[in-house]
Amino acid sequence: MNADFINPFLTAVQNVLSMMAQIELKPGKPQIKKDDVARGDVSGLIGMVGPQTKGSFSISFDENLAIEIMHKMLGERPSGINEEVTDMVGEITNMVTGGAKRTLGEKGYEFEMASPVVVTGTDHTIRHKSEGAKLIMPFEHEAGRAHIEICFDKIS
């Protein structure tokens, strides 16, 4: 997978969480993911389609990190993942993808974005609707981990 294509998503995740929640994530080492099991308790997934390629992006949060983000963004600290937390994860998914879409658009890649879907629960699955490899990137924070996944068909 092309780093010029991946980096806008990595940058957008860090920018959105830093700006909206004053959360600084420490990036880990990217890997190719072989299964569909999410690496968190709540995940947002969004599809993207354009003339050059199609793919999807997801972001998964440990429950404690999602609650910490909710607390920092809205001043609320729910006792668990609830409708407000899932709405927030969907909005974060949208903002990150929108940020990456802008950067990629400047490089000549145009996309239409679908509405995000949010899934919760231990060991839930994320199914990317693309033939490409799934790149997974972990992030660390004292409140928990986040993982982003990026999967695109071959980019032309």
Image (tube, rainbow, N blue to C red):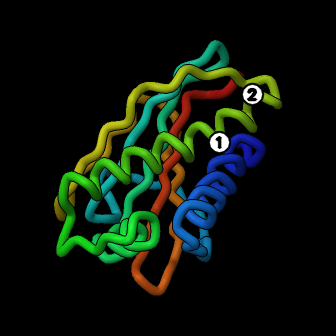
Mark 2 lies on residue: 105
Q: Amino acid at mark 2?
A: Gly
Mark 2 closeness class: few <14, some 14–19, many ≥20 residues within 10 Å: few
Earlier residue among tags 1 and 2 = 1
Q: Give the side of residue 23 with respect to residue 52, left or right.
A: left
Where residue 6 appears, as percent x and y from the top left, is: 67, 47
Q: Residues within 10 Å of mark 1 (few under 14, many from 20)?
A: some
Q: Nearer the viewer, mark 1 or mark 2?
A: 1
Q: Position of residue 62 (x, y in %)?
A: 33, 70
* Residue in the picture at 36% in, 53% down: 88
Residue at the outermost top position = 51
> Which residue bears the numbered disc 1?
99
In the shown orientation, is residue 124 left or right of residue 52? left
Q: In this rendering, would 152 be left or right of 44?
A: right
- Above or below for 127 versus 71: above
> For the residue labelled by badge 1, is the local secondary structure a helix, a strand or a loop?
helix
Marks 1,2: beta carbons within 8 A:
no
Is there any visible trace of residue 131 in the rendered image? yes
The amino acid beneath tag 1 is Gly
Separation of marks 1 and 2 at Cα, in angstroms: 10 Å
Near-viewer residue (61 or 51): 61
Q: Is 94 situated above or below 111?
A: below
What residue appears at the point 40 percent right and 64 percent down from the top-left corner? 74
Q: Quadrant of the N terminus?
A: top right
Residue at image location 56% in from the left, 47% down from the top: 96
Screen quadrant of the C terminus: top right
| Residue located farthest toward the front when viewing the structure as drawn | 75
